[in-house]
């Protein structure tokens, strides 16, 4: 006797469908909260709510797509899930260290140095052992981001030692 395939339906893949429903609900909360943002009448078309509305719409669309995929049996536990590699604790530790150091040091050392440390820890978590190269790339990207925000946009994203020189 051969096993019969189950037809798609509400009893199949409830877990993933609940995840999709949660994302839809979260998108609706973002939408509701966006309506509470005060908008000056000086804005004609593009105001401070355009991006939150776009995020809310994307969340609702993504949630609906996930629900449909779960309903059709295209999303959920697969055979590949049982063969998944175990979590690498050392890599997770490097990521956590980078995040903790970034949060702890950004006020004292500034955005550039804290972001450089975060980048280097993240690169190490992904297996890189080339500290000098990683630090050089991180410093260049952090400086570029800082100068873009601080000088071009006029937004302060963490003044520290290096930012005082710039």
Image (cartoon, rainbow, N blue to C red):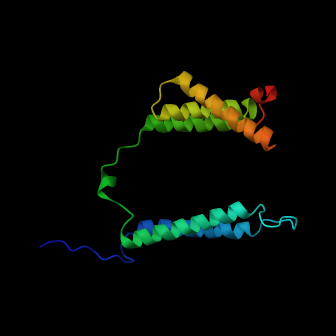
Picture residue at 36% right of the left edge, 43% below the top: 86
Residue 133 percent across, percent down from the top left: 54, 24
Residue 8 percent across, percent down from the top left: 34, 76
103 or 121: which is nearer to us? Answer: 121
- Which of the 4 quarters of the picture holds residue 72? bottom left
Picture residue at 38% right of the left edge, 63% below the top: 76
What is the residue that sits farthest to the top in this orientation?
A: 132
Residue 119 percent across, percent down from the top left: 58, 34
- Which of the 4 quarters of the picture holds residue 54? bottom right
Quarter of the figure that contains the C terminus = top right
What is the residue that sits farthest to the left in this orientation?
A: 1
Picture residue at 72% right of the left edge, 63% below the top: 50
Q: Is residue 91 left or right of residue 36?
A: left
Picture residue at 71% right of the left edge, 35% below the top: 111
User: Is residue 115 depicted above or below 26 in this figure?
Assistant: above
Residue 68 percent across, percent down from the top left: 44, 72
User: How many numbered discs, if any?
Assistant: 0
User: Is residue 88 depicted above or below 33 in this figure?
Assistant: above
Quarter of the figure that contains the N terminus = bottom left
- Which of the 4 quarters of the picture holds residue 49? bottom right
Q: Is residue 105 visible?
A: no
148 or 106: which is nearer to us? Answer: 148
């Amino acid at each position: 006797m051969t096993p019969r395939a189950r037809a798609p339906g509400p009893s199949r893949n409830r877990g993933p469908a609940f995840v999709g429903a949660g994302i839809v609900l979260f998108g609706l909360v973002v939408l509701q909260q966006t309506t509470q943002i005060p908008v000056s009448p000086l804005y004609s078309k593009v105001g401070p709510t355009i991006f939150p509305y776009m995020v809310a719409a994307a969340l609702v669309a993504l949630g609906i797509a996930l629900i449909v995929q779960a309903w059709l049996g295209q999303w959920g536990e697969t055979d590949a899930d049982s063969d998944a590699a175990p979590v690498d604790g050392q890599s997770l530790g490097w990521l956590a260290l980078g995040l903790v150091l970034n949060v702890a040091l950004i006020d004292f050392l500034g955005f550039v140095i804290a972001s450089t440390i975060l980048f280097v820890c993240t690169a190490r978590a992904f297996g890189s052992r080339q500290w000098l190269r990683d630090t050089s790339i991180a410093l260049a990207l952090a400086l570029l981001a800082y100068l873009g925000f601080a000088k071009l946009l006029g937004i302060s994203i963490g003044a520290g030692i290096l930012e005082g020189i710039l």
